[in-house]
Image (spheres, helix red, strand yellow):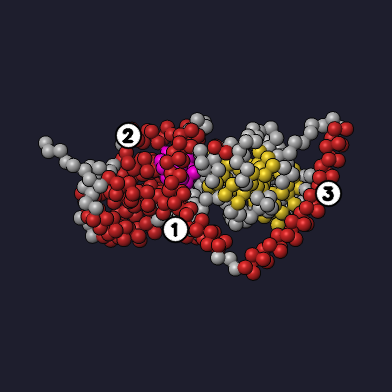
Amino acid sequence: MMQVRHRGGGTIVASFAVALMLDIMPLPHWAALVRPEWAALVLIYWCMALPDRVGVGVGWTVGLLLDVMEGTLLGQYALGFAIIAFLTLKLHRRVRVFPLWQQALTIFLLIVLEQLLVLWIKGITGQSPNLWLYLLPSVSSTVIWPWVFVILRNTRRRFQVT
Amino acid sequence: MLLFLLLSIVLMTVDHRYHHLESLRSALSVVVYPLRYVVNIPSEIGDWASQTFASRDTLQDDNRTLHTRNLLLKAQLQRMDALEAENTRLRELLRASKKVGERVLVAELLAVDTDPFTRLIVLNKGSSDQVYPGQPLVDAEGVMGQVVHVGPFTSTAMLITDPSHATPVLVNRNGLRAIAVGTGASGTLDLPHLPNNADIKPGDLLVTSGLGGVFPPGYPVGRVTKVEIDPSLPFANIEAEPAAHLERSREVLLVWTNHKRPPPQAAAPDGKVSK
Protein backbone atom coordinates (compact mmCIF):
# COMPACT_ATOMS: atom_id res chain seq x y z
CA MET A 1 0.00 0.00 0.00
CA MET A 2 1.24 3.44 -0.86
CA GLN A 3 2.18 5.74 1.97
CA VAL A 4 0.11 8.94 1.78
CA ARG A 5 2.07 12.06 2.63
CA HIS A 6 0.24 14.45 4.92
CA ARG A 7 0.80 18.14 4.43
CA GLY A 8 -0.26 21.34 6.08
CA GLY A 9 -0.58 20.25 9.68
CA GLY A 10 0.35 23.80 10.67
CA THR A 11 -2.72 25.15 8.90
CA ILE A 12 -4.99 22.84 10.86
CA VAL A 13 -3.39 23.83 14.15
CA ALA A 14 -3.60 27.52 13.21
CA SER A 15 -7.30 27.23 12.34
CA PHE A 16 -8.01 25.63 15.72
CA ALA A 17 -5.99 28.34 17.46
CA VAL A 18 -7.99 31.07 15.71
CA ALA A 19 -11.25 29.30 16.60
CA LEU A 20 -10.26 29.03 20.27
CA MET A 21 -9.31 32.71 20.29
CA LEU A 22 -12.71 33.63 18.83
CA ASP A 23 -14.24 31.52 21.59
CA ILE A 24 -12.70 33.72 24.32
CA MET A 25 -12.83 37.08 22.49
CA PRO A 26 -14.40 39.59 24.89
CA LEU A 27 -17.92 40.50 23.80
CA PRO A 28 -20.79 42.36 25.46
CA HIS A 29 -23.01 40.07 27.48
CA TRP A 30 -25.86 39.80 24.93
CA ALA A 31 -23.39 38.99 22.16
CA ALA A 32 -21.58 36.44 24.32
CA LEU A 33 -24.88 34.59 24.65
CA VAL A 34 -25.12 34.07 20.86
CA ARG A 35 -21.41 33.45 20.28
CA PRO A 36 -21.14 30.56 17.79
CA GLU A 37 -19.21 27.49 18.88
CA TRP A 38 -16.24 28.31 16.69
CA ALA A 39 -14.02 25.46 17.80
CA ALA A 40 -16.79 22.93 17.22
CA LEU A 41 -17.44 24.31 13.71
CA VAL A 42 -13.77 24.09 12.75
CA LEU A 43 -13.60 20.59 14.20
CA ILE A 44 -16.61 19.48 12.13
CA TYR A 45 -15.09 20.94 8.99
CA TRP A 46 -11.76 19.14 9.38
CA CYS A 47 -13.46 15.89 10.35
CA MET A 48 -15.49 16.14 7.17
CA ALA A 49 -12.68 17.21 4.86
CA LEU A 50 -9.83 15.08 6.22
CA PRO A 51 -11.42 12.24 8.19
CA ASP A 52 -8.18 10.26 8.21
CA ARG A 53 -6.26 13.08 9.90
CA VAL A 54 -8.63 14.83 12.27
CA GLY A 55 -10.76 12.60 14.41
CA VAL A 56 -11.93 11.83 17.90
CA GLY A 57 -8.51 12.31 19.49
CA VAL A 58 -8.04 15.80 18.05
CA GLY A 59 -11.60 16.72 19.02
CA TRP A 60 -11.02 15.54 22.55
CA THR A 61 -7.78 17.53 22.88
CA VAL A 62 -9.35 20.73 21.54
CA GLY A 63 -12.28 20.25 23.90
CA LEU A 64 -9.93 19.86 26.86
CA LEU A 65 -8.13 23.09 25.94
CA LEU A 66 -11.49 24.84 25.71
CA ASP A 67 -12.36 23.51 29.17
CA VAL A 68 -9.23 25.07 30.59
CA MET A 69 -9.88 28.39 28.85
CA GLU A 70 -13.50 28.63 29.91
CA GLY A 71 -12.75 27.50 33.44
CA THR A 72 -15.38 24.76 33.24
CA LEU A 73 -15.22 21.23 34.57
CA LEU A 74 -12.26 19.44 32.95
CA GLY A 75 -13.54 16.98 30.36
CA GLN A 76 -16.95 18.46 29.73
CA TYR A 77 -16.23 20.01 26.34
CA ALA A 78 -13.73 17.22 25.70
CA LEU A 79 -16.58 14.72 25.87
CA GLY A 80 -18.88 16.87 23.73
CA PHE A 81 -16.23 17.44 21.06
CA ALA A 82 -15.22 13.77 20.99
CA ILE A 83 -18.83 12.87 20.27
CA ILE A 84 -19.15 15.56 17.59
CA ALA A 85 -16.00 14.24 15.93
CA PHE A 86 -17.25 10.66 16.14
CA LEU A 87 -20.62 11.45 14.58
CA THR A 88 -19.08 13.61 11.87
CA LEU A 89 -16.73 10.79 10.96
CA LYS A 90 -19.73 8.48 10.68
CA LEU A 91 -21.66 10.97 8.56
CA HIS A 92 -18.92 12.63 6.53
CA ARG A 93 -19.53 10.78 3.25
CA ARG A 94 -23.13 11.88 3.20
CA VAL A 95 -22.77 15.40 4.57
CA ARG A 96 -19.87 16.29 2.27
CA VAL A 97 -22.10 16.21 -0.82
CA PHE A 98 -25.06 18.01 0.75
CA PRO A 99 -25.87 21.55 -0.41
CA LEU A 100 -24.74 24.13 2.12
CA TRP A 101 -28.13 24.70 3.74
CA GLN A 102 -28.62 20.98 4.35
CA GLN A 103 -25.12 20.81 5.79
CA ALA A 104 -26.05 23.68 8.09
CA LEU A 105 -29.05 21.73 9.35
CA THR A 106 -26.86 18.73 10.12
CA ILE A 107 -24.46 21.03 11.94
CA PHE A 108 -27.40 22.38 13.93
CA LEU A 109 -28.25 18.88 15.13
CA LEU A 110 -24.63 18.06 15.99
CA ILE A 111 -24.15 21.26 17.98
CA VAL A 112 -27.48 20.91 19.76
CA LEU A 113 -26.46 17.40 20.75
CA GLU A 114 -23.12 18.61 22.09
CA GLN A 115 -24.79 21.46 23.97
CA LEU A 116 -27.42 19.23 25.53
CA LEU A 117 -24.69 16.89 26.67
CA VAL A 118 -22.74 19.74 28.25
CA LEU A 119 -25.97 21.07 29.77
CA TRP A 120 -26.66 17.66 31.23
CA ILE A 121 -23.19 17.54 32.80
CA LYS A 122 -23.71 21.05 34.18
CA GLY A 123 -27.02 19.94 35.61
CA ILE A 124 -25.39 16.98 37.32
CA THR A 125 -22.72 19.20 38.86
CA GLY A 126 -25.31 21.63 40.13
CA GLN A 127 -25.49 24.62 37.76
CA SER A 128 -28.39 24.76 35.36
CA PRO A 129 -28.61 27.77 33.05
CA ASN A 130 -31.79 28.83 31.25
CA LEU A 131 -32.34 26.20 28.53
CA TRP A 132 -33.51 28.43 25.67
CA LEU A 133 -30.85 31.04 26.18
CA TYR A 134 -28.35 28.26 26.49
CA LEU A 135 -29.25 26.78 23.09
CA LEU A 136 -28.83 30.09 21.21
CA PRO A 137 -25.22 29.35 20.14
CA SER A 138 -26.40 26.35 18.13
CA VAL A 139 -28.67 28.65 16.09
CA SER A 140 -25.90 31.18 15.52
CA SER A 141 -23.49 28.36 14.62
CA THR A 142 -25.96 27.13 12.00
CA VAL A 143 -26.32 30.60 10.52
CA ILE A 144 -22.56 31.14 10.36
CA TRP A 145 -21.72 27.66 9.02
CA PRO A 146 -21.82 28.42 5.23
CA TRP A 147 -19.23 31.16 5.67
CA VAL A 148 -17.03 29.05 7.92
CA PHE A 149 -17.23 26.24 5.40
CA VAL A 150 -16.28 28.40 2.41
CA ILE A 151 -13.45 30.13 4.26
CA LEU A 152 -11.98 26.88 5.54
CA ARG A 153 -12.36 25.20 2.13
CA ASN A 154 -10.51 28.04 0.43
CA THR A 155 -7.84 27.94 3.13
CA ARG A 156 -7.44 24.21 2.66
CA ARG A 157 -7.04 24.59 -1.11
CA ARG A 158 -4.75 27.56 -0.80
CA PHE A 159 -2.35 25.83 1.59
CA GLN A 160 -2.92 22.41 -0.04
CA VAL A 161 -3.67 20.63 3.20
CA THR A 162 -4.13 16.92 2.58
CA MET B 1 -14.09 6.43 20.88
CA LEU B 2 -15.05 4.46 23.98
CA LEU B 3 -11.62 5.14 25.41
CA PHE B 4 -12.11 8.88 25.04
CA LEU B 5 -15.61 8.67 26.48
CA LEU B 6 -14.34 6.86 29.55
CA LEU B 7 -11.39 9.21 29.84
CA SER B 8 -13.62 12.30 29.85
CA ILE B 9 -16.01 10.80 32.36
CA VAL B 10 -13.16 9.86 34.68
CA LEU B 11 -11.65 13.33 34.27
CA MET B 12 -14.94 15.02 35.10
CA THR B 13 -15.59 12.86 38.12
CA VAL B 14 -12.11 13.38 39.50
CA ASP B 15 -12.23 17.11 38.83
CA HIS B 16 -15.62 17.50 40.46
CA ARG B 17 -15.17 15.30 43.50
CA TYR B 18 -11.50 15.61 44.32
CA HIS B 19 -8.98 18.30 43.60
CA HIS B 20 -6.10 16.32 42.20
CA LEU B 21 -6.36 17.81 38.74
CA GLU B 22 -5.22 21.33 39.53
CA SER B 23 -1.72 20.46 38.32
CA LEU B 24 -3.07 19.23 34.98
CA ARG B 25 -5.21 22.33 34.66
CA SER B 26 -2.33 24.63 35.44
CA ALA B 27 -0.09 22.79 32.94
CA LEU B 28 -2.73 23.17 30.23
CA SER B 29 -3.21 26.81 31.10
CA VAL B 30 0.40 27.36 30.01
CA VAL B 31 -0.54 25.90 26.62
CA VAL B 32 -3.46 28.29 26.20
CA TYR B 33 -1.60 31.28 27.65
CA PRO B 34 -0.41 32.49 24.20
CA LEU B 35 -3.99 32.43 22.91
CA ARG B 36 -5.22 34.42 25.89
CA TYR B 37 -2.32 36.81 25.48
CA VAL B 38 -3.13 37.44 21.80
CA VAL B 39 -6.83 37.96 22.52
CA ASN B 40 -5.87 40.50 25.18
CA ILE B 41 -3.65 42.54 22.82
CA PRO B 42 -6.39 44.74 21.24
CA SER B 43 -7.60 45.99 24.60
CA GLU B 44 -4.00 46.58 25.70
CA ILE B 45 -3.50 48.66 22.57
CA GLY B 46 -6.70 50.54 23.32
CA ASP B 47 -5.48 51.33 26.83
CA TRP B 48 -2.08 52.36 25.58
CA ALA B 49 -3.59 54.59 22.89
CA SER B 50 -6.02 56.29 25.22
CA GLN B 51 -3.14 57.01 27.60
CA THR B 52 -0.69 58.11 24.95
CA PHE B 53 -3.06 60.34 23.01
CA ALA B 54 -4.79 61.86 26.04
CA SER B 55 -4.92 65.61 25.75
CA ARG B 56 -2.97 67.83 28.08
CA ASP B 57 -6.16 69.23 29.58
CA THR B 58 -7.46 65.80 30.51
CA LEU B 59 -4.17 64.89 32.11
CA GLN B 60 -4.09 68.12 34.08
CA ASP B 61 -7.65 67.56 35.18
CA ASP B 62 -6.83 64.01 36.23
CA ASN B 63 -3.80 65.22 38.09
CA ARG B 64 -5.80 67.82 39.94
CA THR B 65 -8.54 65.39 41.03
CA LEU B 66 -5.98 62.81 42.06
CA HIS B 67 -4.12 65.41 44.14
CA THR B 68 -7.30 66.33 45.97
CA ARG B 69 -8.23 62.70 46.45
CA ASN B 70 -4.75 61.92 47.71
CA LEU B 71 -4.94 64.70 50.26
CA LEU B 72 -8.31 63.49 51.50
CA LEU B 73 -7.15 59.89 51.75
CA LYS B 74 -3.99 60.91 53.55
CA ALA B 75 -6.03 62.80 56.11
CA GLN B 76 -8.24 59.76 56.60
CA LEU B 77 -5.21 57.52 56.84
CA GLN B 78 -3.74 59.59 59.67
CA ARG B 79 -6.86 59.02 61.70
CA MET B 80 -6.84 55.38 60.67
CA ASP B 81 -3.26 54.95 61.91
CA ALA B 82 -4.17 56.35 65.29
CA LEU B 83 -7.26 54.14 65.46
CA GLU B 84 -5.30 51.06 64.49
CA ALA B 85 -2.70 51.72 67.16
CA GLU B 86 -5.44 52.23 69.70
CA ASN B 87 -7.16 49.05 68.54
CA THR B 88 -3.96 47.03 68.96
CA ARG B 89 -3.45 48.50 72.43
CA LEU B 90 -6.98 47.65 73.48
CA ARG B 91 -6.68 44.16 72.05
CA GLU B 92 -3.48 43.65 74.00
CA LEU B 93 -5.29 44.79 77.13
CA LEU B 94 -7.96 42.20 76.43
CA ARG B 95 -5.29 39.62 75.58
CA ALA B 96 -7.05 39.03 72.28
CA SER B 97 -5.08 37.88 69.28
CA LYS B 98 -3.40 40.71 67.46
CA LYS B 99 -4.62 41.56 63.98
CA VAL B 100 -1.68 41.55 61.62
CA GLY B 101 -1.82 43.73 58.52
CA GLU B 102 -2.59 42.08 55.22
CA ARG B 103 -0.46 41.98 52.12
CA VAL B 104 -1.86 42.85 48.75
CA LEU B 105 -0.70 42.62 45.14
CA VAL B 106 -2.15 44.39 42.12
CA ALA B 107 -3.26 42.08 39.31
CA GLU B 108 -4.78 42.99 35.96
CA LEU B 109 -7.71 41.36 34.26
CA LEU B 110 -7.06 39.75 30.90
CA ALA B 111 -9.74 40.80 28.44
CA VAL B 112 -10.96 37.28 27.70
CA ASP B 113 -14.42 35.85 28.10
CA THR B 114 -15.41 32.64 29.79
CA ASP B 115 -18.65 30.70 29.92
CA PRO B 116 -21.43 33.35 29.75
CA PHE B 117 -23.50 31.54 32.40
CA THR B 118 -20.87 31.75 35.10
CA ARG B 119 -19.04 34.79 36.44
CA LEU B 120 -15.38 33.97 36.00
CA ILE B 121 -12.54 36.33 35.23
CA VAL B 122 -8.94 35.67 34.19
CA LEU B 123 -6.07 37.46 35.96
CA ASN B 124 -2.52 38.00 34.76
CA LYS B 125 -0.91 36.67 37.95
CA GLY B 126 -0.43 33.02 38.77
CA SER B 127 1.45 30.67 41.03
CA SER B 128 4.73 32.36 40.07
CA ASP B 129 3.42 35.28 42.14
CA GLN B 130 2.33 32.99 45.01
CA VAL B 131 -1.35 33.23 44.12
CA TYR B 132 -3.23 30.34 45.74
CA PRO B 133 -6.70 28.86 45.20
CA GLY B 134 -9.23 30.45 47.53
CA GLN B 135 -7.39 33.75 47.65
CA PRO B 136 -9.70 36.75 48.12
CA LEU B 137 -9.88 39.44 45.48
CA VAL B 138 -10.87 43.05 46.18
CA ASP B 139 -10.99 46.34 44.30
CA ALA B 140 -11.03 49.89 45.60
CA GLU B 141 -14.71 49.67 46.58
CA GLY B 142 -15.13 46.19 48.00
CA VAL B 143 -14.81 42.44 47.71
CA MET B 144 -14.85 41.06 44.16
CA GLY B 145 -14.47 37.31 44.56
CA GLN B 146 -11.94 34.56 45.07
CA VAL B 147 -9.38 32.67 43.01
CA VAL B 148 -10.53 29.22 41.91
CA HIS B 149 -7.86 27.90 39.52
CA VAL B 150 -4.20 28.86 39.48
CA GLY B 151 -1.83 28.41 36.56
CA PRO B 152 1.82 29.47 36.42
CA PHE B 153 1.12 32.83 34.72
CA THR B 154 -2.64 33.26 34.90
CA SER B 155 -5.37 32.43 37.34
CA THR B 156 -9.14 32.20 37.14
CA ALA B 157 -11.29 33.87 39.76
CA MET B 158 -14.95 33.56 40.57
CA LEU B 159 -16.88 36.77 41.21
CA ILE B 160 -19.23 37.05 44.19
CA THR B 161 -22.17 37.25 41.74
CA ASP B 162 -21.54 33.74 40.38
CA PRO B 163 -24.52 31.51 41.16
CA SER B 164 -22.29 28.98 42.92
CA HIS B 165 -20.56 31.55 45.13
CA ALA B 166 -21.61 32.46 48.65
CA THR B 167 -19.98 35.12 50.81
CA PRO B 168 -20.31 35.19 54.61
CA VAL B 169 -21.32 38.76 55.48
CA LEU B 170 -22.61 40.78 58.39
CA VAL B 171 -24.67 43.93 58.49
CA ASN B 172 -22.28 46.70 59.46
CA ARG B 173 -24.93 48.56 61.47
CA ASN B 174 -25.79 45.82 63.96
CA GLY B 175 -23.60 42.80 63.30
CA LEU B 176 -26.40 40.59 61.97
CA ARG B 177 -24.81 37.63 60.17
CA ALA B 178 -25.98 36.45 56.75
CA ILE B 179 -24.83 34.74 53.60
CA ALA B 180 -24.73 36.66 50.31
CA VAL B 181 -25.31 34.29 47.42
CA GLY B 182 -24.63 35.25 43.80
CA THR B 183 -27.51 35.20 41.35
CA GLY B 184 -25.67 35.11 38.02
CA ALA B 185 -27.03 38.57 37.21
CA SER B 186 -24.27 41.13 37.31
CA GLY B 187 -25.66 43.59 39.85
CA THR B 188 -27.49 41.48 42.42
CA LEU B 189 -26.71 39.35 45.44
CA ASP B 190 -29.33 37.35 47.24
CA LEU B 191 -29.53 37.07 51.05
CA PRO B 192 -31.55 33.92 51.68
CA HIS B 193 -32.56 32.43 55.04
CA LEU B 194 -33.05 35.67 56.95
CA PRO B 195 -36.26 35.62 58.99
CA ASN B 196 -39.03 38.12 58.32
CA ASN B 197 -38.30 40.00 61.53
CA ALA B 198 -34.57 40.38 60.89
CA ASP B 199 -33.30 43.90 61.51
CA ILE B 200 -32.16 44.79 58.02
CA LYS B 201 -33.25 47.64 55.76
CA PRO B 202 -32.42 49.03 52.34
CA GLY B 203 -29.18 50.99 52.41
CA ASP B 204 -27.51 48.80 55.04
CA LEU B 205 -23.84 48.16 54.35
CA LEU B 206 -22.78 44.51 54.26
CA VAL B 207 -19.17 43.70 55.15
CA THR B 208 -17.33 40.39 55.16
CA SER B 209 -17.65 38.65 58.50
CA GLY B 210 -14.44 36.62 58.26
CA LEU B 211 -16.33 33.44 59.01
CA GLY B 212 -15.46 30.64 56.64
CA GLY B 213 -11.83 31.66 56.63
CA VAL B 214 -11.59 32.76 53.00
CA PHE B 215 -12.30 36.48 53.18
CA PRO B 216 -10.60 38.70 55.75
CA PRO B 217 -13.19 40.43 57.95
CA GLY B 218 -14.28 44.00 57.43
CA TYR B 219 -14.20 44.46 53.66
CA PRO B 220 -17.39 45.95 52.19
CA VAL B 221 -19.40 43.52 50.06
CA GLY B 222 -22.49 45.48 49.08
CA ARG B 223 -25.51 47.51 50.05
CA VAL B 224 -28.98 46.16 50.65
CA THR B 225 -31.27 47.42 47.88
CA LYS B 226 -34.52 45.62 48.50
CA VAL B 227 -36.20 44.05 51.53
CA GLU B 228 -39.50 42.37 50.71
CA ILE B 229 -41.46 40.83 53.53
CA ASP B 230 -44.18 38.40 52.57
CA PRO B 231 -45.80 36.93 55.70
CA SER B 232 -46.74 33.79 53.79
CA LEU B 233 -43.08 32.92 53.18
CA PRO B 234 -40.75 31.67 55.90
CA PHE B 235 -37.90 33.98 54.94
CA ALA B 236 -37.66 37.58 53.80
CA ASN B 237 -36.70 38.27 50.20
CA ILE B 238 -33.60 40.45 50.44
CA GLU B 239 -31.40 41.67 47.62
CA ALA B 240 -28.13 43.56 47.72
CA GLU B 241 -25.98 45.31 45.18
CA PRO B 242 -22.23 44.53 45.15
CA ALA B 243 -20.02 47.40 46.24
CA ALA B 244 -17.11 46.46 43.98
CA HIS B 245 -17.17 47.47 40.31
CA LEU B 246 -17.38 43.86 39.19
CA GLU B 247 -17.86 44.58 35.50
CA ARG B 248 -15.72 47.67 35.24
CA SER B 249 -12.49 47.16 37.16
CA ARG B 250 -9.40 46.49 35.11
CA GLU B 251 -7.13 46.27 38.12
CA VAL B 252 -7.85 44.18 41.18
CA LEU B 253 -6.04 43.56 44.45
CA LEU B 254 -5.11 40.07 45.56
CA VAL B 255 -5.09 39.87 49.35
CA TRP B 256 -2.98 37.55 51.48
CA THR B 257 -4.79 37.04 54.74
CA ASN B 258 -2.98 36.59 58.04
CA HIS B 259 -2.78 32.86 58.37
CA LYS B 260 -2.02 32.18 54.72
CA ARG B 261 1.39 32.15 53.10
CA PRO B 262 2.66 35.70 52.54
CA PRO B 263 4.47 36.54 49.29
CA PRO B 264 8.24 36.71 49.63
CA GLN B 265 9.65 40.15 50.31
CA ALA B 266 12.19 39.90 47.50
CA ALA B 267 9.61 40.02 44.69
CA ALA B 268 9.62 42.83 42.14
CA PRO B 269 8.70 46.16 43.71
CA ASP B 270 6.40 47.29 40.87
CA GLY B 271 2.73 47.04 41.68
CA LYS B 272 3.46 45.65 45.10
CA VAL B 273 1.95 47.47 48.02
CA SER B 274 2.25 46.31 51.56
CA LYS B 275 0.23 47.78 54.35
- Residue A66: in magenta span: yes
Dot 2 falls on a residue whose secondary structure is helix
Q: Are marks 3 and 1 in contact (CB under 8 Å)?
A: no
Q: Can you give x and y, in whole percent of width and height, for residue B124 in the image?
A: 54, 46
Label 1: how many Cα within 10 Å (few below 14, some 14–19, many 20+) = some
Q: Chain of mark 3?
A: B
Left of B49 or right of it: where is B136?
right
How many dots with numbers? 3
Question: Mark 1 = which residue?
Answer: A34
Could you give the CA–CA distance between mark 3 and mark 1, rounded to whole angstroms?
51 Å
Give residue B79's mark.
Answer: 3
The residue range painted magenta reads: A64-76
Tell me which residue sits at (75%, 61%) in the image.
B68
Q: Residue furthest left?
A: A1
Give residue B2's mark.
Answer: 2
Q: Are marks 3 and 2 in contact (CB under 8 Å)?
A: no
Q: Chain of mark 2?
A: B
Instruction: For marks 3 and 1, give the one nearer the viewer.
Output: 3
Could you give the CA–CA distance between mark 2 and mark 1, rounded to whole angstroms?
31 Å
Tell me which residue sits at (15%, 38%) in the image.
A3
